[in-house]
Image (cartoon, rainbow, N blue to C red):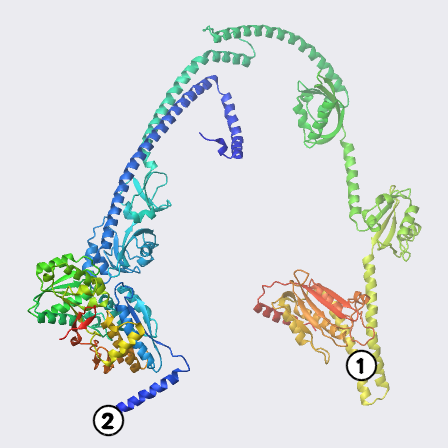
Amino acid sequence: MNTRFAIRLCSALAACAGLLAAPAQAAPAKAEPVVIAISAEFSVGGSTAAQDIEAGVNMAVEEINAAGGVLGGRPLVVETRDDRGVPMRAIDNLQELAGNPNVVALFCGRFSPVAIELAPIANAQGLLLLDPWAAADGITQSKQRPNYVFRLSLTDAWAMQKMLETARKRGYKRLAVYLPNTAWGRSSETALKTLSQRSPGVQWQTYWYQWGDTDFSRILSDLRLWKADAVLMVANEREGALILKGIAAFPKQSRPPILSHWGIAGGNFVALLGGPEALAEFDLSVVQTFAFKGLKTARATALARAYRARHKAEISDLAGQAGFAHAYDLTHLLAKAINRAGSTRRAAIRDALEQTGRHDGLVRRYHRPFSPSDHEALEPADAFIARFDNQGRLYRTPR
Amino acid sequence: MFNIRMFNLPLIGRIRSALRPQFSRTLSRLDQLGLRERITLTLLAGALLIGATVAAASFLYTRQLILDNTQTLLETRASRASHALEIKLAGTAAQMEALANNTITGNSLADSVGRDLYLIPLIRNQHLPFSQARLILADYQGRELTSNNLRMAALGKGLGAFPAYQSMMQTGKPTASIDRQATLPPLLVMAWPVTYNLTGNIEGGLVLVIPLSELIADTNPDESLALLDRRGVLQIGSLGKNPLSANVALDLPELFKPLGLVQVLSEDRNVALGKLNVLVFLYLGFGLFLVVVINGLARASARRLIAPVNAMATLAEQIADTGWPGPERLKIGRRDEFGRLSAAFNTMIERLSESYTRLENKLDAGTQALRQSENRLRHVMNATGEALWDWNIPANQVTHNMRWCQMLELGQEFLSHDIDGFINVVHKDDLPRVNEAIQQCMKEGVPYVIEYRMVTSRGRHFWVLDRGNVVEREKDGTPVRMVGSMTDITARRDAEEAAQERTEQLDTIFTLSPDGFVSFDAERRVRYASPAFLNMTGLASEDVVRLTEDRFDSLISLLCERSMPFPGMAMLRSKACDQTAGKAVKRTLIELKPPNSRVIEVGLSLSRAASVNAVMYFRDVTQETEVDRMKSEFLSTAAHELRTPMSSVYGFAELLLTEQFDDATRTEITQTIYNQAGLMASIINELLDLARIEARRGKDFVRTTFDVRELINTVVSSYKPPHGRPGPETDLPATPLYIHADHQKMRQAISNILSNAYKYSPDGGRVRMRVLSPETASQAKEIGIEIRDEGIGMTPPQLARVFERFYRADDSGNIPGTGLGMSIVKEIIELHGGHIDVQSTFGNGTRVTLWLPQGKEAVGKEELGKNMVDSTESAAPSP
């Protein structure tokens, strides 16, 4: 114990010395900034996820820069690119950013189809791809070594597990599962198939829709034909709102409860639905990993204050609170890894990320966020069920 | 039908003038044809003209009919073909639009991993009416995401490079364009926008690529389909060379509108008109048959028409042949114009027969009288001594006397003959002259006298004097009879020719002789002065000829210088007598005054001939005299130049022999002797050099081609300037300049001039050398070597004598030298074909420029080096 303390003391002293020395060294020549890039769906109407992720990254970067930046005084800067939610545009952005040696990592947006196509390219280019939102399981499960993709977010498998678990708890027997015909939908389906073996009491039927579909009358009529107890919905805010509006057409007593993947929390879902009062028409539960409402940690309080001061808004009003929080924590982990690597060499940072130790984050306390075999910072237990309050804000339901 | 003004009028004129002789030849050939042939030809030509007109008109009408018919058919078929194509393209466009708007297509843009499962079956199940159509889904930059098949060769560029794709991405509307790449057949590229469901943006496109050739695939074998764009440029298919064609603007959906496609269905005009060829062959066959038939009919009718005229012509020809109207008469079988003509012809023959008999009786009486008269004349002619002739011109009869036959050694049968008999005995060379004289006499009526040669029957030539005149003429002046006589003058002509030949020989001798001659006749007057004499004295022949001896004497005395006067004719005569008597006589020289300044030896020879009393000769001895003078002058100068150092040597040597001196003085005296002997040696050496150069006239020069710069460098490096003076400054061009010369001699020449430059600038000053290349020099093709000093220079009189031997500008004796250097330089340079330019200002220095012809530049460096070695070896014997 004493020995360990002594080592800690030494390292703390050394860190202090480093902190003291760093500005002195950086002062004469202006230090070259270290770039964190974000390629996300900034211009997709109704979606705020990209902006929420950017806010989270920025908030973390401000804190890190205020504490002296990284690598002994180099400031972090954020560069953003719009990929419009189109995989090919995101790939083009990645390839462009990979050419800039100062770019150490790229944050992707919320869309799994985009992230899942970026992952192999990021590995091929040797550029860190940090995923604060997209949930498709396959994103981090590349066979390529070394794997440059790290996620601090929910996965479809955990989401499905949580939803199935909830369904079983609530006694739903027949589930109608709505899936988009994309990587995200298929990832969810795979998870469902795997998990349903463990929940033998629950029957389910999948209904596929195209991304961007506007007419869900067919799958909704099937819902009644199949006599589902509940709807298990994998959708983004736009399709989600349309499906719910379709369900709203049913008589109130025959409206099934809805267990939704968290895609609907990525934008103006509440507004699309017609305002917070429209939420009262449904029994809607959403899988989540983070909600500010009711969180009382010191860091959360401090952040809420800082956010208020900066954005003149309440942090708990954010639609994509989870994305904000994930990006925030992931940025801090990245900064630690950069310092640990001692350079902006991407391979070194990647290795350092895998070696990063305990970190007190906003979402949780990470004991060892990543390891060579596990690039998921969260774990299944981090998923919980949330509901919208009467102001359209998500809150964690009591267990 | 056509406008003649369209053609080039001068060309028409040329063609017309070329054809005119041809046409007139044909006309004259037609004139020679008989009446029967002419009638046949006229009938035949008429029939052919009418036949050809009818045939041509019906041919043209039929041809137009076929073309109109084909055109109508073509238009119908074109309309059908274009409808088919319109339906195909419109259907395809609608199908593609539906596919592009399908949400599955939009969804697939976000689903690269899974889309192949549903998109490929969807795309491949699009049954398109074009077998080679390639259907491609592309991303926002035109990169291919998936396609229906891979049958078509890979497109050479990304779809994003196609104008249709770019335009579609910009406007968001379906577009179509025609794309031509070097490696691919022309393609119709159509693109439809694909909207990304999530955002509503256009994030990709559906592209359909069809080879243009598929649009014109189904045609009949005789026809060809083609597509033109809105500018009428051919995009696919062919139009043929001389086609019948039907154009149909295609009515296609909106996206094809900018292309403005026009379909052209065409058929080779020759194929359409192929059927007409059979008709043409039929026309030709029938036409030939008609020509044969009409020809037969025309011949038969012409023969019948012309029969009486033929009979008349045969009888007339018979009378013309015999000259006597016989008993035959024409048969009169018809009562038409030919019958009347035959009757009149018979009457005419009767009248002709009567008058012929009367004329014959009268002629017999006249002939008898004439024969008697001729006999009388012949007797008279034989009696004269001269050969006589009498030419009856209309009868072409020449009559002679016996003397003519004797002269020409002919028999009596030649007493009378035609004019050819005369022409045969005149010498061929004289015949034109004789003919001309006779013709002139006939024309002007003046008797002629002419001498010419004749040839006897044995081939002997002899001269005659022929006199003749016209003695009888017709009323209109036409000569009827000429008479004349001939005399043999051969002996006289021979004597004249001998005299003429001798005179010409003498003339030639006197004319060509370089010595002048003047001859005097018995009255002692100048009879002849030769051209050489006139040339020497500048006198004209008429100034001298016919002068008496005294006046000639004073004329020559006036021309002579007082120093060498003319001694007078009397003195010359006395010398001539002495010479004849065998005494030694000193030759007489005179000198003519300027401008003829010449020294001339004169002499006189007496003659006993009747026509020539004396001949005086004049020989030009100027050259000999001048050479003698120069030799003695040179000898005296050379001796004088040698005598000065010689007396020093002699004097000092005597001193040494007779007196005792201390060592220093003796050394000084010996030094003086040595110096003076050295000067003598160099005078003698240079004299020998000069003599050798003059004697050999450059034949011993070893000429090589070398760079002038190298020459100058060699001279400068080996030249030792006087003590305390810097070497000459040189200014040489950058590029080599070649001359063809003797290196050794050139070195000698330049050294001499350099030496003078230093010697004649005793107070110092720069000595500069430079080369004047042809570019800088006024003299083209010559290279100048200029040596310049800043010394004492020369006055103009000194400059004028600078090349004189032993001439030295310095007469003080302070500057050493022989006075031969510049002469040697001049000889060397002039024997090289060059010249020297010396410019000098008294007190300001001298500039000498040696001008040499430029050598060939082609000589390489190695060859140059080799030549240098050669020249050194062969020049070794030179001192």
Q: Residue furthest bottom?
A: A2
Q: Residues within 10 Å of mark 1 (few under 14, many from 20)?
A: many
Q: Is disc 2 surrounded by few (<14), some (14 to 19) or many (20+) residues within 10 Å?
A: few
User: Which of the two discs, 2 and 1, sits closer to the camera?
Assistant: 2
Against B227, residue B788 (above or below) is below
User: Residue at point 73% right, 17% down?
Assistant: B472
The single residue placed furthest to the left in the displayed view is A201
Residue A190 to residue B324: above or below: below
Residue drawn at point x = 54 percent, y = 14 percent? B321
- The label shown at residue B416 is none
The quarter in which the C terminus of chain B is drawn is bottom right
Q: Is residue B22 left or right of B130 when viewed as pictured? A: right
Pick the residue in front: B443 or A50. A50
- Distance from Cα at disc 2 to Cα at disc 1: 123 Å
Q: Which residue is mark 1?
A: B673
At which x and y percent is residue B508? 77, 45
**Position of A69 relative to B313 (above/below):** below
The percent coordinates of residue A273 (x first, y second) are 20, 62
The chain under label 2 reads: A
Q: Quadrant of residue B347?
A: top right
Residue identifier under label 2: A3
Which amino acid is tagged 2?
Answer: Thr
What's the residue type where badge 1 is placed?
A: Ile
Q: Position of residue B157 (x, y in %)?
A: 32, 58
Observer-nearest of B104 and A389: A389
- Helix, strand or loop status at disc 2: helix
Q: Secondary structure at mark 1?
A: helix
Residue B829 visible from this viewpoint: yes
* Co-location on one chain, circles 2 and 1: no
Q: Is residue B628 left or right of residue B578?
A: left
